[in-house]
Image (cartoon, helix red, strand yellow):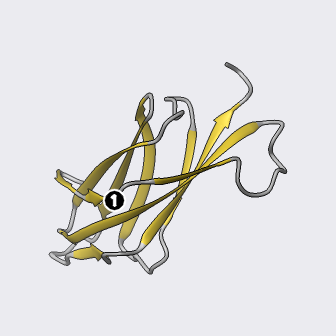
Amino acid sequence: MATNIEAMTAGTPVIVRNAGPKQFQALFDVIEVQVTLTEASIAAQVASQATITVPGVELNDYIHVSYPADITGLILKATPSASNTVKITAYNLEGTDANTTLAGGLVAKLLILKPKFGS
């Protein structure tokens, strides 16, 4: 597991509300977010984090994140850390001294599902 946490650079998020297919509209409200992530080097067994502001996000929301490149050896995770705040973490799970990067200029996509049930 990651023993150190570094800072990652995140650009200004672009938020699109109620976009995409409506097949789960009875269960969730949807927020789509696109944000540029840049990290020059994440050492083995180290995590890198960035925090972005996303209006409407709450602690009980589900977030799926995807990245348009091969990031073998990395786990990319996004979680709500407070109201209106999302923490994006990249974990380098390589067991050697291999460094891994998130290529600059590529846009990560976050799909935020806001449950309509169990509130």
Q: Position of residue 111 (x, y in %)?
A: 59, 52
Quarter of the picture containing the N terminus is: bottom left
Looking at the rendered structure, the kind of residue marked 1 is: Gly
Residue 86 visible in the displayed image: yes
Measured along the vertical axis of the image, is residue 51 above or below residue 98? above
The answer to whether 95 is drawn above or below residue 111 in the figure is: below
Given residues 47 and 10, the one toward you in this image is 10
Q: Furthest-top residue in view? A: 119
Q: Is residue 117 left or right of residue 86?
A: right
Question: At 28% from the left edge and 68% from the top edge, which residue is drawn?
Answer: 38
The image position of residue 97, as x and y in percent, is: 15, 75
Can the viewer see residue 1 in this picture? no
- Residue at horizontal 45%, vertical 79%? 69
Residue at 34%, 64% in the rendered image: 37
Which residue does the numbered mark 1 point to in the structure image? 11
Other-residue count near label 1 (Cα within 10 Å), few / some / many at <14 / 14–19 / ≥20 = some
- State left or right for residue 90 relative to residue 62: left
Q: Position of residue 90 (x, y in %)?
A: 33, 59
**Quarter assignment of residue 101:** bottom left
Helix, strand or loop for disc 1: loop
Q: Residue at x 37, y 51 (%)?
A: 88
Q: Residue 30's quadrant in the figure?
A: top right
Quarter of the image that includes the C terminus: top right
Q: Residue 49 placed where, x, y %?
A: 27, 52
Q: Return the residue nearer the eye: 111 or 43.
A: 111
Query: Residue 97 vs residue 73: left or right?
Result: left
Horizontal side of 87 relative to 96 (left or right) equals right
